[in-house]
Image (cartoon, rainbow, N blue to C red):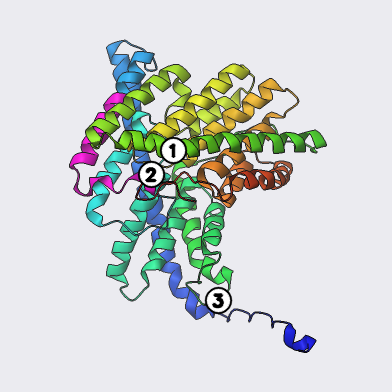
Amino acid sequence: MSNEAAVAPPPPAPPAVSARTLLPLVAPALVVGVGCSLLFLAVSGAAEKLQDVLWTTLPDALGIGGYGSLWMIVMLTLTGVLVGLVVWQAPGHAGPDPATLGLGGEEPLPPYVLPGLIVATALMLAGGPSLGPENPIIATNVAVAFWLGRKVLPKAPGTLWVSLASAATLGALFGTPVAAALVVSEALAGKPMPIKGSLWDNLFAPLLAAAAGALTTTLVASPSFDLGLPPLGRPGWGDLLAAIVVSCAAAALGMAAVYAFPHVHGAFGRLRHPMLMLPLGGLVLGLLGALGGHLTLFKGLHEVGELAADPEGWSAGQFAVMTVVKLAALLVAASCGFRGGRIFPAVFVGAAFGLCAHALVPGVNASVGISAGVLGMLLAITRQGWVSLFTAAVLVASPAVLALMCIASLPAWLLVTGRAQMQLSEDGTSLH
């Protein structure tokens, strides 16, 4: 056989896509982007108002501390009761078991499920369990966009509405379309492209929807992930070593929770009824909150800002307690049936872990510690490489930190890839 015959021909370049193919996607992308952001803001705003009533107005009226141990136990247990009632009685039971769901990509939910899911999510966000809004908000926006999109443009493929709504919600959640572009590109890897063109042709509409969602959120709510930490100057070898060690240690800690997940979920599952599972889960979360303090409650993003505002304000032991308690609270909340996502509380766990490293070894820069801790924890909990790297870098607005995190992500990824994920199959076993 000749050398020419033995060499495989290069793969053909993707066909060119004309502007005529992409321009009709502009209006749907903009509408979906704005709509997804507004729905997210409406649910978040309602939850924040209810949170203020439950944790400030009501305890003040009763003359007790809003974050006293007894009040935390009562409120978390009551939240479990209320969410349990919704899951038990609402049509569709507020969606499938959240332990079996990822960040997106599942089949759109039927519209009748959405009211219960929205109410359960708002109660969870206000009541204090350690979960974020991302999974149920994405599921809700995908279902609404899919249902309305098929009504308005019946000839458009259903996957279009799923990708637009997912990207738009991610843009709204993070206040930037970059995260959505990274997630969509990762989701498209190894799969047939919806549009027979290049990757950027397929990113065009989702990126536009994400930009519309992010801009709407920014104009209305002005979100910011930047913790305001001092920028890292020229990094040294010590910073690189710290980033690698902290990210790998955080990933190992996160994997401990991942391996415990099916066992904790199975223990709650043996109760078989949401009015047993969720109130008991709320009681456990209240006890954990009494142990770890009020900063270990809620989704954790605002609380991360409090930690970063005073990195020297707690001892290494206190940071360690907050890390372990928040991770345990995330594990319990995700196992007993609360509707919510795992990214935002995992950010708190990683940040507290990184600040613990800074407190133990003052030579570990606080910015490096936080970014590396968040990176390793998110890699273990979400298995979303781009989201983990993006979130770790955006918390500390510094090009030097981004370079360190790119390197630190490699050994941390070796610790988590191919292992169990914090997502369960229908039979209760971990996905790999």
User: Residue 175: percent from the left, percent from the top?
Assistant: 51, 47
Badge count: 3
Three-letter amino acid code of the residue under disc 2: Ala
Q: Residue at x 63, y 26 (%)?
A: 355
Three-letter amino acid code of the residue under disc 3: Gly
Query: Quarter-wise, where is residue 369 in the image?
Result: top right
Q: Residue at x 36, y 20 (%)?
A: 72
Q: Nearer the viewer, mark 1 or mark 3?
A: 1
Find numbered disc 1 in the image and state the secondary structure of the residue it sits on.
helix
Residue position marked by numbered label 1 in the rendering: 261
**Dot 1 or dot 2, earlier in sequence:** 2
Do the numbered discs 1 and 2 sit on residues whose CB atoms are within 8 Å? yes
Up the image or down, 64 lies above or below 405; here it is above
Disc 1 and disc 3: Cα gap in Å?
A: 40 Å
Q: Nearer the viewer, mark 1 or mark 2?
A: 1
Disc 1 and disc 2: Cα gap in Å?
A: 9 Å
Find numbered disc 3 in the image and state the secondary structure of the residue it sits on.
loop
User: Residue 140: percent from the left, percent from the top?
Assistant: 33, 52
Q: Residue at x 60, y 35 (%)?
A: 250
Find numbered disc 2 in the image and state the secondary structure of the residue it sits on.
helix
User: Dot 2, how many residues are within 10 Å of its Cα: few (below 14), some (14-19), or many (20+)?
Assistant: many
User: Residue 133: percent from the left, percent from the top?
Assistant: 40, 42
Residue position marked by numbered label 3 in the rendering: 197
The magenta-colored residue range is 77-100
Q: In this view, does 308 lie to the left or right of 169?
A: right
Query: Quarter-wise, where is residue 306 in the image?
Result: top right
Three-letter amino acid code of the residue under disc 1: Phe
Q: In this view, does 366 lie to the left or right of 60?
A: right
Residue position marked by numbered label 2 in the rendering: 99
Residue 298 among magenta residues: no
